[in-house]
Amino acid sequence: MKLPIYMDYHATTPMDPRVFEAMKPYFLETFGNAASRNHSFGWEAEEAVEKSRKQIASLIGATAKEIVFTSGATESNNLALKGVAEMYAEKGNHIITAATEHKAILDTCKRLEKHGVRVTYLPVQTNGLVDLEQLQAAITDKTILISVMYANNEIGVIQPIAELGKIAKARGVLLHTDATQAVGKVPVNVIKDNIDLMSLSGHKMYGPKGVGALYVRRKGPRVQLTAQMDGGGHERGMRSGTLNVPGIVGLGEACALCQAEMAEESKRMAHLRDKLRDKLQSELDETYINGTMEHRLPNNLNISFAYVEGESLLMGINDIAVSSGSACTSATLEPSYVLKALGAGDDLAHSSIRFGLGRFNTEEEVDYVAAKVIDVVKKLRDLSPLYEMAKEGIDLSKVQWAAH
Amino acid sequence: MAYSDKVIDHYNNPRNVGSMDKSDPNVGTGMVGAPECGDVMKLQVKVNPETGIIEDAKFKTFGCGSAIASSSLATEWLRGKTVDEALEIKNTDIVNELSLPPVKIHCSVLAEDAIKAAIGDYKMKAGKTEAVTSSVASN
């Protein structure tokens, strides 16, 4: 077993070597511009791009023409929200999203608010899921778009997208979903789920960084977008810019591999994840799983170890790459807004660790990680005045703390 | 974030971890911070009433590595000092000793507050001065 162990697959994944192999010829040999229409270099590049489009479409139940290549999910999210807001401005100016969305959605919404768009941020329930009745109630005749993520990047919970899709369709509102964490991990089907726009990214599914796609429905309804990048009119005029052919080939290959191996892989992920959870919970008291286990990515475990601060835990397990919702580990010095949105309390957000398992994790690694985390949590609890107080029977929520 | 060797050393081998009897008249207890802020420090001193010298110091900290190191270091420094000398320990001394980066300065401030709170508690018990309770947590 090699150290350090990587268990942060929600942040990024290593490329699958098979993806790398597929990309290789497109750097040095088949280097043409896919928009060059009058020679074989261009044709070969275009052929590779179209193959990728089909591979992506096949994985998500779309048709090839509905795939728009971008630089990644952040750009896809920006294009979807800004493109719809601008294109449908005459129809309405209201967007509904959720409090636990990725910053690429939330910050895009903030920007749109400055330009006169009204945004409703739906709260989530303690299990991390949006409430369908609240969604229904939030829709007005000015609502043009609902944007709710497929699976959450911190807590891995899977939103009831098919239900959202039904509601959106019935009310004549478009549904966008940021499916960055879900595509390739769980079955996603834009037809079954009534999805109109969907963002995905290469580097979260064993493909390359710097490439992603936006699915844009062409039929029932035909979704239109105002381009946010002006130029040569590539990608049906929705996203100008010379195509990143090697990246696109890699994204396509990554999708094909996920499609072929998903059933088996998700079973293996769930087994490793459940083993990790069982080991941690059998050895440690007062651990709390953040978000529902029932509707969740098979590779995600987000767990709070009460009375232990997340960054100090990361410091003790420095040969394991995971992340924490603790303020001390974030750039903003605020604890995770996703965990706060669950209403668990800031103290549990500070104590949370996100384990993101993936294709290259082994049983042996899970055993090592579990043993190490248990050891360090116990050590830090011996050091924790809060654990001591809790053991003495003091109700920490009743203590008047001196905030600072 | 990269930690200094001294922070790592205190984290791996924290000095003087533990608790003393709060009700002992010679023990002063300071508890500062709040769980929702991600740091709580408990610092205790045991003072020889004859000499005014701190004979023992113990800590327990919920917080990041720098918070643990700051309080661990504080207990080392407190031992052997008189209560008045202890009050002269400044957070900047801790910052310098542990090479704390700017985002971790609040850990040193918390440690200084914990020292002041512990000494204040001792003095109050000993009837030497008015209570310094501003940052002492109470049930």
Image (cartoon, rainbow, N blue to C red):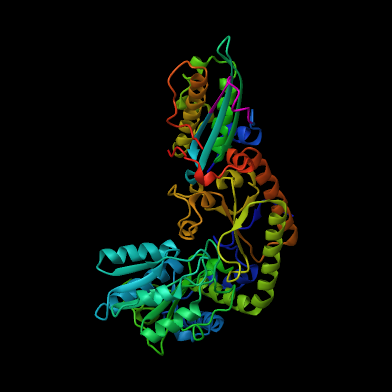
Q: Position of residue A228 (x, y in %)?
A: 32, 71
- Residue A256 image-quadrant placement: bottom right
Position of A280 compared to A72: left or right? right
Q: Within the magenta stretch, is there residue B25?
A: yes
Q: Position of residue B116 (x, y in %)?
A: 47, 25
Q: Residue furthest top?
A: B50
Above/below status of A152 relative to A50: above
Residue A37 appears in view: no
- Residue A15 image-quadrant placement: bottom right
Above/below status of A273 relative to A388: below
Magenta residue span: B19-29
Q: Nearer the viewer, residue A299 or A35?
A: A299
Q: Nearer the viewer, residue A369 or A68?
A: A369
Q: Position of residue A270 (x, y in %)?
A: 67, 68
Position of A231 compared to A256: left or right? left
Q: Residue at x 58, y 74 (%)?
A: A184
Q: Within the magenta stretch, is there residue B119?
A: no
Prevailing secondary structure class for the magenta stretch in the rendered image: loop
Above/below status of A201 relative to B37: below
How many numbered circles are shown?
0
Q: Residue at x 59, y 72 (%)?
A: A185
Q: Residue at x 42, y 38 (%)?
A: A404
Residue A262 appears in view: yes
Q: Position of residue A183 (x, y in %)?
A: 55, 74
Q: Residue furthest bottom?
A: A220
